[in-house]
Image: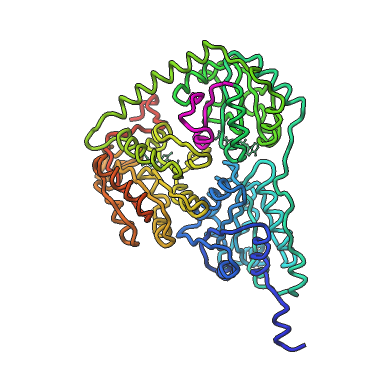
Amino acid sequence: MSDVQRVAEVTDGNHLVVDALRMNGVSTIYGVVGIPITDLARIAQAKGIRYIGFRNEQAAGHAAAAAGYITQRPGICLTVSAPGFLNGMVALANATTNCFPMILMSGSSDRATIDLKQGDYEELDQLASARPFAKAAFRVDKPELIGDGVARAVRTALSGRPGGVYLDLPAQVLRETIDKPAGEASLFTVATPAPSQIPSRESITRALDLLRQAERPLIILGKGAAYAQADEQIRKFVEGTGSPFLPMSMAKGLLPDDHPQSAAAARSLVLGGADVVMLIGARLNWLLGHGQPPEWSPDCKFIQLDISPEEMDSNRPIAAPVVGDIKSAMTELLARMNPGDIKPRKTWLEAVSTKKMQNTEKMRANLAREPVPMDFFSALRAIRDVLDNNREAFVVSEGANTLDNGRNILPMYEPRKRLDSGTWGVMGVGLGYAIAAAVESGSPVVAVEGDSAFGFSGMEIETMCRYGLPIVVIVFNNNGVYRGDEVNRYSSDPAPTVFTSGSRYDKLIEAFGGTGYDAETTESLTTALRQAFETRRPTLINCVIDPKAGTESGHLEHLKLE
Ligand code: ADP
Ligand code: TZD
């Protein structure tokens, strides 16, 4: 056999990883290159996988997680060893916490040297480090096992409760050559990585019985329901019950926020007043006051639809657990429900409707004001009005006041279009989520960011410009964390919450060829946002907010700290 023929018959770990990913439907990799994975990114590009290069692995990881959530395919983040891997770990842990399917793939240094702590370049026992923070962690120890490793990672990320998976790729495995036909034969496509999990008949019967007894029912839709892509079944079911529903923040838009059954504007009333609550892909965690009084009635009974059996009773006894995937559960419920089966009391519906009207009226008054400088209400109102004509846009949001007010003020009309700080209340997701939303969908994205929140991933505006993405970042510049007017009484250093005053975030994006606007009034904010939608150019709006406008979350005022 000639030398030329011989070369043509070998492949290496890098090629096998890329081929295995392609066979499993991966179309995009988010990452940061360096030793030992630069060639992997090049080969991926050569073989038709899109590689989106970031400035920090944390943002790349958040992008992968958001891609997983939006597409129901595992989002892939590629990093170098030790520090790059650790930067990506925040995103992996956050993906697991939020139940987003994601795979963090990191190159790793020589295992023998690591195990004896002999000081290799970027030395770290990555597999052990990842375990506590991931749904699972795997290592591929020889090129013949790459197909198995990718398959294990894909199936684990997607099946059951989705989550973050770590896949360790040792440098020597990536560069090792093996016989090409044997290597290729070792790869395969995972069959039905997220098989339906049909809930038991009895659990559906019990849930329906409880719903039929309900006088004051409430349905809570969580981001698990949005992820499940059972939009039509969920709409039919909710409408079939006639019950008020409450969307958790990332489930907004699953049914449009202006739906007559939405009880979002009567949240306290419905939580406190419901006698039967049906949780659909939502956990009774801190975001729902752990299901406990005083937010909830001590007598209320819960039905919970979730793919994860151990979620049941985590915070309160669940009277009717329905364990299965939401699409299957919804299909079963719809098949066994008759029109008029579920009869919310008229007084309940009237009470919800009255409260909604009162709260909407109060909000309208807050939104109508035109303070100078702008406050959170007036700026969000201006954004809301432009978004009303651009309903296909994604809304990404993080911060404290910016996030909390935005959740109430910015309505959503389409499913899976709102991405925010989520279960952990984490800062730093903004630009990664925005980039993934634009890359995966091609739709425009508006990222409404507190100025502190923006800082965590701000350098990714260069990434956004490099790929020419239709993203507009609106930085709510109130000059600090929560607010910008705190004074340090003890030294000349700025107070812990305060940033440089008069910062012009819009100038940052100009350095990379993007468009910057400085908006000091709602009028200029409106014009800037409209133009951003028209041009679809990467844009950053420095939105000047009164430094006195915010309130501090979790302030320990009661401790009377001096
Ligand atoms: P939210 O923060 O919106 O309340 P959570 O993240 O707390 O939502 O809850 C999402 C829940 O949805 C998790 O408990 C998860 O197990 C569940 N889940 C995710 N995907 C599915 C699915 N396809 N079918 C059923 N449950 C799912
Ligand atoms: N670090 C990380 C990773 N996540 C966090 N949640 C925090 C720190 C603490 N934190 C919050 O919980 S909100 C917030 C921080 C730093 C920023 C709030 O300020 P902002 O928003 O400028 O982003 P507002 O709208 O001015 O309140």
Quadrant of the drawing holding the N terminus: bottom right
Residue 433 picture location, percent across and down: 48, 49
Q: What colouring method underlies this structural image?
A: rainbow
x, y percent for residue 416: 53, 41
Looking at the image, is 265 positioned above or below residue 345?
Answer: below
Depth check: 377 or 93 in front? 377
Query: Residue 25 lies in what quarter of the image?
Result: bottom right
Quadrant in the picture for residue 241: top right
The foreground one among 423 and 419 is 419
Front-most of residues 144 and 255: 255
- Residue ID at (45%, 60%): 55
The answer to which of 178 and 366 lies nearer the viewer is 366
Whether residue 117 is situated above or below residue 259 in the rendered picture:
below
Q: Is residue 199 above or below residue 138?
A: above
166 relative position to 536: left or right: right
Residue 96 picture quarter: top right
Q: Position of residue 121 (x, y in %)?
A: 56, 68
Which x, y percent locates residue 385? 35, 37
Dominant secondary structure of the magenta stretch? loop
Ligand 1 is found in which quarter of the picture?
Answer: top right
Rendered residue at 58%/31% (across/down): 235
Residue drawn 72% across and 67% down? 143
Question: From the viewer's perspective, is 466 left or right of 483?
Answer: right
Residue 246 magenta: yes
Any magenta on residue 499?
Answer: no
Magenta span covers which residues?
242-263
Q: Is residue 423 visible?
A: yes
Going by the picture, which residue comes out furthest to the bottom?
Answer: 2
- Asked if 451 appears above or below 241 in the picture, the reply is below
Q: Quick check: can you spot residue 120?
A: no
Residue drawn at x 61%, y 34% as measured from the top left: 281
Quadrant for the C terminus, please: top left
